[in-house]
Image (cartoon, helix red, strand yellow):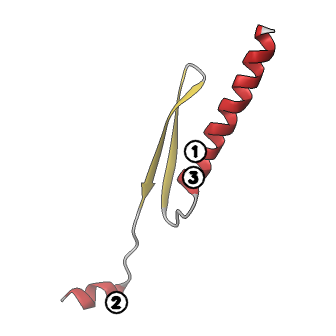
Amino acid sequence: MSEKRNTVENAQGLKDISQKIAAAIQGLRYGSVEITIHNGRIVQIEHREKQRLEFDDFSKAT
């Protein structure tokens, strides 16, 4: 019984992690998503987004 419960919990945990990774990627045009793993487990998800500026953006600022 315990082994079955662990399998269900692991499956739910994997689904939760997959959803968090998908949320970090969604809408990202330029940037990166970094996944940190310790001892075979995902412990951190970082989302970095870069903003690309067009030449016209600089001329409007002056």
Q: Which residue is mark 3?
A: 23
Of circles 2 and 3, which is in front?
3
**Rendered-image quadrant of the N terminus:** top right
Q: 42 or 7: which is nearer to us?
A: 7
Of circles 1 and 2, which is in front?
1
Q: Amino acid at mark 3?
A: Ala
Horizontal side of 17 relative to 43 (left or right) equals right
* Whether label 1 touches label 2, CB < 8 Å: no
Horizontal side of 56 relative to 24 (left or right) equals left
Secondary structure type for disc 2: helix
User: x%, y% of residue 4?
Assistant: 81, 15
Mark 2 crowdedness (10 Å alpha carbons): few <14, some 14-19, many ≥20: few
User: x%, y% of residue 22?
Assistant: 62, 51
Q: Which residue is mark 2?
A: 56
Q: Is residue 21 above or below residue 59?
A: above
Q: 62 or 14: which is nearer to us?
A: 14
Where is residue 26, by image quadrant?
Answer: bottom right
**Rendered-image quadrant of the C terminus:** bottom left
The numbered dot on residue 5 is none
Horizontal side of 6 relative to 51 (left or right) equals right
Q: Is residue 20 above or below residue 14?
A: below
Q: Residue at x 60, y 22 (%)?
A: 40
Mark 3 crowdedness (10 Å alpha carbons): few <14, some 14-19, many ≥20: few
- Kindly report the distance in space between the C-alpha atoms of the residues bearing marks 3 and 1: 5 Å
Q: Which residue is mark 1?
A: 20
